[in-house]
Image (spheres, grey):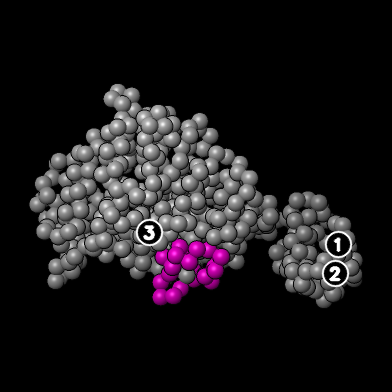
Amino acid sequence: MEERTSRKKPRERLSEFVSALREDILTGKRAIGDFLPSEKSFAAEFQLSNQSVRKGLDILVSEGLIEKIPRVGTKVIGPLDEAFVTVKLGFHSSVTGEAGIHQLLSIFQEENPHIRVQAVPTSSTNYSYISDYLSGGILDVVMMNFMNFQECVENGAEGLLEPMERNPELYSFLSDAFQVNGRQLVQPFIFSPLILCYNREHFRAAHLSEPDSSWQWNDLIDYSSRLAIPGERLGFHCDLYSSNRWPLLLLQTGEKFVRHEDGRLKLAGTPMMDALRYCGEMKHSIPSLSEGVTTGESELLLAKGKASMIMTSYFYLNYLLGEQVSFDIAPVPHLGTPMTMLLNIGLAINRQSRVKAAAAKLVEFLTGYKAQLFVRQNTYSLPARKSAAEWVGGERRYLPSRFSLFRETIPSFRYFTDLAISARELSVINQELKMYWAGLETEEAMCSQIEERLAVGSLS
């Protein structure tokens, strides 16, 4: 190690000393059996007192990396398997591309060689798996979206999550969504509003003005028909069946679900039923609106020139990385008042974890500026840290000219909970809507089924 001078505080210099010596041992620069320099040498090199050096060495003794031999010296005895701490991270498999999670974990482990991260893919659509993994102690850190978190709270399982300090560097509206009774249970990681994405060349060739914030759904329907070429391309493509898509139209009505006196949802004869009916009518107004869409299909069609417009998210824009298509983005169309749906993904620590300190360090890294800036510079996803999300500099990939429109549309962000329904209710409604929109269930039957399945005390 080279002698260094520093204006850092004693605590920071101590941390630097411990980290540097630990890394030397774990990487083999200081081999097992070697004796370390004297405490006096370390004190001079790191500008520490002898007492601070002893404190640092004691930390490495507790980690099983070194041992102090009276009247002989300090000997390297690690690394041993038990010298490593393993943190099991449950992550949504889609975030592999949406945030470059594996690259981030590699950076983390380079900086923290004594912490091994075991990445465990989990489903973002089924909270029961996450709950089982947490209660069973299988995961130490888990990735949760807003839907997962709501299911956790609704099931009274928030006690599985370790409270954390609120991070003022992250967007407050993201942190607010992951709080219960003033306790921060999840730290925001990445987020995205729903947006409209379009092929700029198609608009130019058709001599049409590009979408802007004034667009209402009728404008989209009109432009879709003018851009579509039968047998060649679709004017608009969207997975309306997704629970991250169709609630947008309901949110834009400004209405909320109403209930019977016993607490059951009421649909028949309500503004919400009118909105659901409008969703179905829009499907017929845009014949190209596909059903049974697979993940990334809309983006692939846009990339191949087979669709002129899609409704998507910043997350899914990552399917366009490296594609040779001139695309841009705009706010989603509305019903008179600009409004969009917000998707929020965060990180939680298992309260029962036996390696909480290492787990907290991983969460701190992933929400820190370095990792968050990596997300901003290498993907299209929006990092939760404000300074990283709003970073401006030399871009490493094609960036649509309106990329930063999310900053101006923040006041229009809404969650599905603004409809006054729970995650469980949203799931049941979603299942029945598929039958209704496919023409396999009447409006009356759909309303009856939803009300029956969501009766108070029902476990269906």
Q: Amino acid at mark 2?
A: Gln
Position in image of residue 163 (x %, y %)? 49, 71
Q: Position of residue 312 (x, y in %)?
A: 39, 44
Q: Secondary structure at mark 1?
A: loop
Q: Amino acid type of disc 1?
A: Arg
CA distance for labels 3 and 2: 53 Å
Which corner quadrant holds the N terminus?
bottom right
> Looking at the image, which residue is at 78% across and 60% down?
21
Residue 390 visible at all: yes
Would you say residue 177 sits in the magenta stretch?
Answer: yes
Q: Is residue 21 magenta?
A: no
Q: Look at the numbered discs 2 and 1 and tell me whether their residues touch, using CB distance below 8 Å.
A: yes
User: From which residue to which does the magenta span run?
Assistant: 160-183
Disc 2 crowd, CA 10 A, few/some/many (<14, 14-19, 20+): many
> Which residue carries the number 2 mark?
47
Q: What residue did someone put label 3 on?
A: 412
